[in-house]
Amino acid sequence: MAGKGESAGHNRVVSLVSAASELIEIKARLWNGYINVRILLYDYEDNESGPRSENARENTKKPKEFLCRIYRFSYLTLQLPNIIQYFQDFQPELAQRQLWFEYEGVPVKWNLPVGFLYDFLHLPSVVGDIEGSSGRSWTLVLRTQEYPSEYIIPFIYKNHDSAPDYDRCLKEVIVNQLKQSSFVLNGNSRSIMSLSETNSAKLWNSIKTHNLPVYESVNKKILPKDRAQRLPIKIYIPGTATIIQAPISPTKEDKTTSLRDVLETHLPHLFGPKNGNIAVPYIQGVDAGSLLDESLQTTWEIFKHLDNFLYIVVIPKN
Amino acid sequence: KITIRFVPIGSTPRITSAVFTISSNQTVSTLTKFLGKMLKTKEHVYVYIQNSFQPNPDEKLNDLYHLFKTNNELIVSYCQSVAFG
């Protein structure tokens, strides 16, 4: 009997250790996840005046193409220096313009993480075709004119050469998102407001340079020490303007809140005993169906983005 | 409908009436446009929730209200320059 107990205890320790190392592995895999992005630049926007030669028309049909890999835990604007450098040979005035990205006619919100943008904009069209889509890239069009300020945040800060200061604009958005999520988590944003200058700079640089250890070392100063008051979660439904952000407590009447609880409460027409589950939640590009009954706080801890929000994309089944 | 209270920061002018009720499905960008009109400015108006963060323009006022209200009002501070770093 004693032997049996010992081995059960031993097994428990082994499984705890392996669970911890699995967690580290999952975090690293998420952090290193990237998306192959193909960026197209047409030159029609700049050739509106004057008759076009046969040659120019030919060029219009064939856009210039820039291929890159962008981490899911990153932002499109961070790629702009490389993109500008590459396309500048074809359109020298590019650097002065407010650049924006378009996906199938829709302006892409640069203030959101790339992994989320891919899941929200592109994933619905490749779901169910996972085999065929692997290795394929996500194609965006780089636009140089007619910045759609109504749909995406304008770049209000300029460098001294009057080119948009993309870095400063992105930094401001991220810091504010971090304050917002911190407020939800802690009931105030004191932890981030009181970060030292050095730590704030470290945090921003770790986001820019994709450095996980540095990012985590500063971010843990922002996160609640023990229990989160509420969880910063955003739920999106592709093709709609629906964004759900609600006060979600990690526990309710001593019961741990699960993803299922949240979906059934806020999207009863898509989830729940009445209608059956007629949609699938995706988190970081992964079908989160198997996480429905797990603790939402644990899922948030593992899958949250750089701004400490957990992004859930709900795709209705066909 | 939800109630919003506008509070100026620093030397930003006060608007005539500070408390408004607004349809809850409006977004933050409606709010900034409205403030721009009230302040008669074409400059960017910065808005802050809980004197700490700027919400994204596409966020719904209803969501922000339920997350960040104080005494059943969503307190929105505004300013014509960046206020809280």
Image (spheres, grey):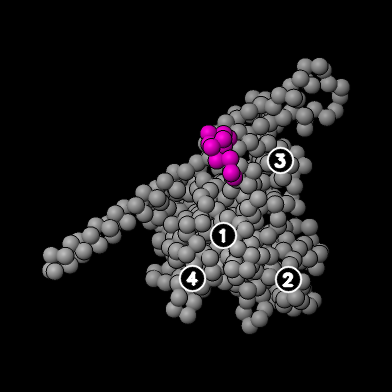
**Residue holding disc 2:** B24
Amino acid at the residue labelled 3: Glu
Where residue B74 sits in the image (x, y, percent)? 66, 75
Q: What is the CA distance from the residue labelled 1 to the residue labelled 3?
A: 27 Å
Residue A104 numbered mark, or none: 3
- Find the residue positioned furthest to the right: A51
- Residue at (55, 63) in percent of width and height: A233
**Magenta region, residue range:** A127-137
* Residue A135 is a magenta residue: yes
Instruction: Give the class, few, some or many, for how many residues have Cα within 10 Å of label 4's Cα (few <14, many ≥20).
Output: some
Q: For the residues carrying marks 2 and 1, which lies nearer the camera in this image?
A: 2
Q: What is the CA distance from the residue labelled 3 to the residue labelled 4?
A: 37 Å
* Residue B43 is a magenta residue: no
Q: Secondary structure at mark 1?
A: helix
Where residue A232 sits in the image (x, y, percent)? 53, 65
- Find the residue positioned furthest to the left: A2
Q: Can I make out residue A73 in this image?
A: yes
Please give the chain letter of the residue carrying mark 1: A
